[in-house]
Image (spheres, grey):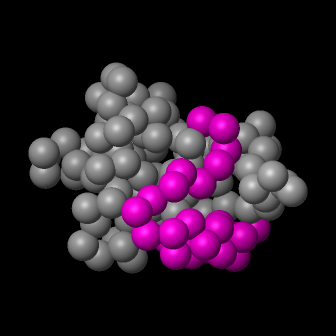
Amino acid sequence: MPGLWSQIYQVVKCIPRGRVATYGQIAQLAGLPNGARQVGYALSALTDPHSVPWQRVVNVRGEISLRSNPDYADLQRKLLEAEGVVFDCKGRISMSQYQWRSGCGGVFE
């Protein structure tokens, strides 16, 4: 898995500040069709959470996905808000406004 996970991490590192991507989007870009869960596993396995902007990955509904530690959801929201990402009253991000859609060194083109 580490080889696949490093591909996932490389794609996540391309997401610019103030933008988000979905787990499925990252999986597709990393060459893992139907690999959204693998993206979740890879991000939860990060030993240095500062090395990859994990907070920029959300579910397809623009929501923060639940984790075993509920403090991570609060942290993820705070990190995204600090980048200028706005949540609505239901805790969702407007994907039409904040979803990342540009290239990543040939990976996403």
Q: Place residue 102 in its image quadrant.
A: top right
Q: Is residue 92 left or right of residue 13?
A: right
Residue 103 at x, y = what percent?
51, 39
Q: Is residue 29 left or right of residue 38?
A: right
Q: Is residue 106 visible?
A: no
Residue 12 at x, y = what percent?
42, 52
Q: Residue at x 59, y 54 (%)?
A: 64
In the image, 64 versus 15, the foreground residue is 64
Q: Residue at x 56, y 42 (%)?
A: 59
Q: Is residue 51 left or right of residue 88?
A: left
Q: Quadrant of the N terminus?
A: top left
In the image, 27 versus 70, the foreground residue is 70
Residue 25 within the segment the image draws in magenta? no
Q: Is residue 1 visible?
A: yes
In the image, 48 versus 13, the foreground residue is 48
Residue 34 at x, y = what percent?
36, 24
List the single residue furthest toward the top: 33
Q: Place residue 52 in its image quadrant.
A: bottom left
Q: Which residues are magenta?
A: 60-84
Q: Residue at x 51, y 69 (%)?
A: 70
Looking at the image, residue 57 lies above or below residue 81 = above
Tally the numbered discs: 0
Q: Residue at x 65, y 75 (%)?
A: 78
Looking at the image, residue 54 lies above or below residue 109 = below
Residue 104 at x, y = what percent?
45, 43
